[in-house]
Image (cartoon, helix red, strand yellow):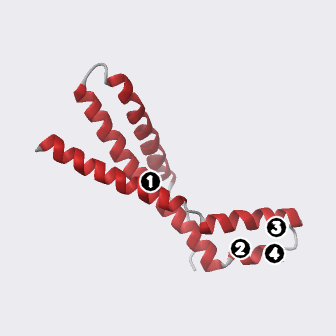
């Protein structure tokens, strides 16, 4: 199996800033409501598109981690590590089991789908 690699730094920064900008864009809507419906709409689109980008990325990361744990049987191998204390083994085992079985990816899927639907509905309402 090829060595798993993280995305290049500029890609990781892109996803990071997409999430930050999306969050700020949604939060500033409360202020923009007092000034301009146009800027509320722009901010909403920026936030929604940013969340779509960010949460599809988070889903992919969650899937990759779970797949690596399953394929390499890492959670099963922890107990045979000799340089770790029993507490270390238990802690690492917990981390690996929960990464493998977490429901967080379904949260990402839900946010991605609802953001996509909101974007589609917004486009239909704004341009028809």
Relative to 127, residue 96 above or below: below
For the view shown, which residue lies furthest in the top direction? 35
Determine the image quadrant of residue 28: top left
Residue occupied by mark 3: 89
Residue 18 x, y percent position in the rendering? 42, 44
The residues tagged by marks 3 and 1 sit, at their Cα atoms, a distance apart of 31 Å
The residues tagged by marks 1 and 4 sit, at their Cα atoms, a distance apart of 33 Å
- Crowding around mark 1 (Cα neighbors within 10 Å: few <14, some 14 to 19, many 20+) is many
Of pointers 2 and 1, the one earlier in the residue sequence = 1
Determine the image quadrant of residue 103: bottom right
Q: Is residue 87 rendered to the left or right of residue 45?
A: right
- Crowding around mark 4 (Cα neighbors within 10 Å: few <14, some 14 to 19, many 20+) is some
Label 3 secondary element: helix
Judging depth in this view, the residue of 83 and 79 nearest the camera is 79
The residues tagged by marks 3 and 2 sit, at their Cα atoms, a distance apart of 10 Å
Q: Is residue 88 rendered to the left or right of residue 110?
A: right
Which of the numbered marks, if any, corresponds to residue 55?
A: 1
Residue 74 x, y percent position in the rendering? 69, 74
Q: Which quadrant is the C terminus positioned in? A: top left
Label 1 secondary element: helix
Of pointers 3 and 2, the one earlier in the residue sequence = 2
Do the numbered discs 3 and 4 sit on residues whose CB atoms are within 8 Å?
Answer: yes
The residues tagged by marks 2 and 4 sit, at their Cα atoms, a distance apart of 8 Å
The residues tagged by marks 3 and 4 sit, at their Cα atoms, a distance apart of 6 Å
Residue occupied by mark 2: 75
Residue occupied by mark 4: 79
Q: Which quadrant is the N terminus positioned in? A: bottom right
Label 2 secondary element: helix
Relative to 44, residue 96 above or below: below
């Amino acid at each position: 199996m090829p060595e798993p690699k993280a995305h290049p730094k500029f890609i990781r920064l892109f996803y990071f800033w997409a999430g930050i900008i999306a969050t700020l864009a949604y939060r500033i809507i409360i202020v923009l409501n007092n000034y301009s419906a146009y800027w509320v709409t722009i901010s909403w689109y920026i936030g929604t598109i940013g969340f779509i980008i960010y949460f599809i990325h988070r889903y992919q990361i969650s899937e990759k981690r779970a797949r690596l744990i399953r394929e390499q049987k890492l959670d099963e191998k922890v107990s045979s590590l000799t340089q770790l204390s029993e507490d270390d083994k238990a802690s690492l085992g917990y981390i690996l089991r929960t990464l493998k079985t977490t429901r967080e990816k379904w949260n990402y899927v839900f946010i991605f789908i609802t953001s996509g639907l909101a974007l589609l509905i917004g486009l239909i309402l704004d341009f028809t």
